[in-house]
Image (spheres, rainbow, N blue to C red):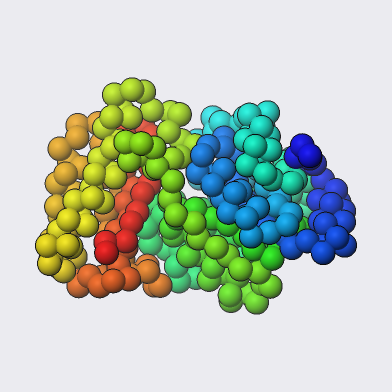
Amino acid sequence: MAVTVVKSVADVRKAVKAARAKGLNIGFVPTMGALHEGHASLVRHSTKECGYTVVSIYVNPTQFGAGEDFDKYPRTLDADTKLVDKAGGSLIFAPTDREMYPNYRGADGTWVDLVGLTKQLEGASRPHHFRGVTTVVTKLFNIVQPDKAYFGQKDFQQCRVIQRMAADLDMPLEVVMCQTVREANGLAMSSRNVYLNPEQRKQALCLSQTLTKARELYARGERNAEKISAAMRELIASHPLARIDYVEIVDHDTLASVAEINESSVAVLAVFVGTTRLIDNGYLK
């Protein structure tokens, strides 16, 4: 059966109610569209574990800051629909801004703002980004009411923030973090990769190469976080089109920078390649 596309909250709730009446559990994959194989893998994870999978496609304006790429962010609903259908999704929710934020006027409105995991890393570089993320995800969780929601590890901090938010607010669902999907050359799949020209795509490999370098140092016995992060920065600096936003080694739970690396340490980085900002991460063990 072909995937169904709906644009209203009422239609999502009607479809989910009908699925539950058939005894199906509900999986949910929130996206901003411009879907690729990484998103398809999330849909497949959901269809493997849940009887009915909802995918949202919505470029959320409240998580973009001034001067970011909201206006040019790729919007490819027809292609996205084909990908979700092929991956086995049941329903696509593709709302308008008016549908998602009918009562918001500028800064007025109800916001969900997590304190503690959102000020560093992406939060330091993109103020108010996570307030937009947590608010829209809360709204989507309330609309879809899933049993499980699936997020990619590429957006590691976002995953941890959503997991913490769901736990703190006693949301009755499981937030599942799925492994980053990479291109054959190691580049993490991202909707923003379409901004890269051929030479920039080559230089963007410094992100995954940097993570490989960090793992090699860890495997050789290095546990000093500053020494490993310095080696990571040096490798990125050797690529003339790359400019570092941040390179950190953090604790899995708190996202605080660590001095000594252990099995729960995660290397996280954000790098501009040309004008395109890319992120990546990985456990060192």
**Left or right relative to 1: residue 88:** left
Residue at 57% x, 43% y is: 40
> Which sits in the foreground, 268 or 17?
17
Q: Is residue 284 above or below residue 167?
A: above
Q: Is residue 63 left or right of residue 241?
A: right
Report the residue at 58% width, 75% height from top. 167
Q: Is residue 23 left or right of residue 180?
A: right
Residue shown at the point (68%, 34%) measured from the top left: 81
Residue at (14% x, 58% y) in the render: 217
The furthest residue to the top: 198
In front of the other: 85 or 74? 85
The location of residue 21, given as percent across then percent down, is: 87, 62
Instruction: Name the side, left or right, on which 175 lies relative to 211.
Output: right
In percent of width and height, residue 243 lies at 26, 39
Res 282 → quadrant: bottom left
Q: Foreground residue, 85 or 62?
A: 85
Residue 263 visible within the image: yes
Q: Is residue 256 above or below residue 209?
A: below
Disc tally is 0
Can you say whether 169 is above or below 92 in the image? below
Q: Quadrant of the C terminus?
A: bottom left
Q: Quadrant of residue 281?
A: bottom left
Q: x and y percent of residue 164 in the render?
A: 53, 71
- Report if residue 64 is visible in the image: no
